[in-house]
């Protein structure tokens, strides 16, 4: 054994980290086995929207478990029917067909295949490439990772990745074209058209994007005409628009779905995280009727699927969560608390190492820079994100370390703040104070 600290048989993602053991959760709090309490200001990883330990969900889980937990093949169950109906009622336009899977990566991977299937059925079998954006995140399976633009997480697996094009982010604070909105005339959106023409539109199946960035550059929100422009370009070249709502779906940005802030209807949506608020692993790919119709009229089967997709237990739990969000008006509460939190965090931009505070609803990002004027990122070797997250952690508050490389795939420091929608005003105050004090402390350590 070379590991001095080995205490369990788990194959951890980060092997030399000290893992705290959680015993239970209640509301916005997690408790470890030493009764230490943590304010979960990132909802795990933008997941736990309704809070931990909600009795109604546990009851729904037990009720379904007593009936049946798993079916397959020719069977469908009432929870699956009801959940699909509930989701279709929430989604905009004709996004009415719900394909269930178990996690976000499966949902985006399924979206990729669904888009390809649509083009095969409608007589365009050459279309297969998905265009995406740098600094985006769509998951860890090979198709999802091929679409993702997070360089450090792609690096080890590049030999396996598909040859999919990426365009720049609509990241106004760090415009890749060194321009300013609206004078830029949306160079970042128009790059989509240029790349479609360059690659050949006959090969392009879809474009995928997170409406508001979740984990790679948290809270980055494109300008008002960005998605309408993207929609137009997709339509012009018969390219499906996939919106990855795994983070933003089910209320996180103060609307049911992030894309609704732009009044644009995509052809496919992937959802996960907030669908069940973490009470069970479940995710879904939601298709426009025209996609379902094309398969229905054509080969009649979508040759894809996973063992646990649509299992009755997960569907019953997710349905109970969605009913809970609805009956407690939690999307409106998220919008209200998000506005309050953003207002309180904005003044942090006066601190010397804070570059930008941004976001919508309860999906907020804070970016750090070594020089505000030049917007210069820190040297990644300094580990500034880790220093700040650890300092906030020592104050009993959990925030998410932003993924490395948010600026150019190598440098960039930021954190994400995304508490459950049930967060109260005093808890917002506590989070803001912990973040502010930690930034001040770390700034001093860095010599500011
Ligand atoms: C926008 C987005 N899409 C997809 C995924 C992948 O989801 P999962 O980790 O559940 O596979 C994530 C995960 O963080 C995500 O943020």
Image (cartoon, rainbow, N blue to C red):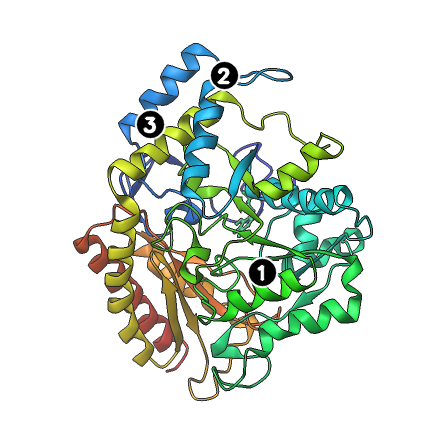
Report how many numbered discs are placed on residues in the image: 3
Image coordinates of residue 337 in percent, x first then y, are: 25, 56
Q: Earlier in the sequence, mark 2 or mark 3?
A: 3
Q: Secondary structure at mark 3?
A: helix
Assess disc 2: are there few (<14), some (14-19) or many (≥20) residues with their C-alpha within 10 Å of its C-alpha. Answer: some
Residue located farthest toward the bottom when viewing the structure as drawn:
373
Residue 26 in view of the camera:
no
Residue 302 in the image: above or below residue 167: above
For the residue pair 23 and 295, the one nearer the viewer reads as 295
* Res. 85 image quadrant: top left
Q: Secondary structure at mark 2?
A: loop
Residue under pointer 2: 69
Image coordinates of residue 373 in percent, x first then y, are: 43, 88
Q: Is 111 placed left or right of 261 in the picture? A: right
Q: Secondary structure at mark 1?
A: loop
Assess disc 1: are there few (<14), some (14-19) or many (≥20) residues with their C-alpha within 10 Å of its C-alpha. Answer: many
Q: Kindly indicate whether the residue at mark 2 contacts the one at mark 1 (C-beta within 8 angstroms).
A: no
Could you tell me how far apart the alpha carbons at marks 1 and 2 are, in whole angstroms?
35 Å
Residue located farthest toward the right when viewing the structure as drawn:
126
Which image quarter is the C terminus in? bottom left
Q: Which mark is residue 147?
A: none
Image coordinates of residue 11 in percent, x first then y, are: 60, 38
Residue under pointer 3: 57
Within 8 Å: ligand 1 and the Cβ of disc 1? yes
For the residue pair 244 and 226, the one nearer the viewer reads as 226
Could you tell me how far apart the alpha carbons at marks 3 and 1 are, in whole angstroms?
32 Å
Q: Residue at x 71, y 59 (%)?
A: 155
Residue under pointer 1: 136
* Res. 368 image quadrant: bottom left
């Amino acid at each position: 054994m070379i590991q001095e600290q080995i205490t369990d048989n788990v194959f951890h993602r980060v092997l030399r980290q000290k893992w705290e053991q959680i015993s239970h959760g209640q509301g916005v709090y997690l408790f470890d086995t030493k009764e230490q309490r943590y304010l979960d200001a990132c909802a795990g990883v933008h997941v736990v929207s309704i809070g931990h330990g909600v009795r109604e969900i546990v009851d729904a889980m037990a009720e379904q478990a007593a009936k049946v937990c798993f079916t397959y093949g020719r069977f469908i169950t009432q929870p699956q029917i009801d959940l699909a109906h509930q989701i279709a009622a929430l989604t905009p336009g004709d996004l009415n067909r719900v394909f269930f899977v178990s996690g976000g990566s499966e949902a985006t991977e399924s979206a990729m295949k669904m888009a390809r299937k649509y083009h095969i059925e409608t007589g365009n079998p050459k279309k297969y490439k998905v265009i995406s954006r740098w600094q985006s995140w769509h998951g860890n399976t090979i198709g999802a990772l091929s679409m993702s633009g997070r360089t450090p997480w792609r690096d080890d697996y590049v030999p396996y990745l598909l040859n999919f094009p990426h365009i720049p982010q609509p990241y106004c604070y760090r415009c890749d074209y060194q321009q300013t909105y609206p004078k830029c005339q949306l160079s970042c959106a128009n790059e989509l058209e240029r790349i479609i023409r360059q690659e050949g539109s006959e090969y392009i199946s879809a474009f995928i994007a997170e409406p508001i960035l979740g984990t790679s550059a948290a809270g980055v929100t494109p300008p008002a005409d960005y998605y309408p422009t993207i929609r137009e370009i997709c339509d012009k070249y018969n390219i499906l628009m996939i919106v990855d709502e795994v983070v933003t779906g089910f209320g996180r940005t103060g609307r049911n779905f992030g894309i609704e802030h732009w009044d644009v209807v995509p052809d496919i949506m992937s959802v996960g995280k907030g669908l069940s608020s973490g009470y069970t692993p479940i995710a879904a790919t939601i298709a426009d009727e025209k996609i379902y119709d094309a398969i229905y009229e054509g080969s009649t089967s979508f040759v894809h699927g996973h063992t646990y997709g649509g299992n009755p237990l997960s569907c019953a739990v997710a349905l109970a969560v969605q009913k809970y969000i609805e009956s407690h008006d939690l999307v409106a509460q998220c919008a209200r608390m998000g506005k309050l939190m953003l207002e309180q965090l904005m003044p942090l931009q006066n601190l010397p190492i804070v570059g930008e505070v941004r976001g919508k609803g309860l999906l907020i990002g804070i970016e750090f820079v070594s020089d505000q004027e030049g917007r210069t990122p820190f040297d990644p070797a300094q580990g500034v994100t880790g220093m700040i997250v650890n300092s906030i952690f020592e104050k009993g508050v959990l925030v998410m370390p932003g993924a490395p490389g948010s600026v150019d795939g190598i440098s960039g420091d930021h954190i994400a703040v995304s508490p459950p929608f049930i967060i109260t005003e005093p808890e917002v105050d506590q989070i803001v104070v912990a973040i502010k004090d930690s930034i001040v402390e770390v700034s001093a350590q860095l010599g500011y």
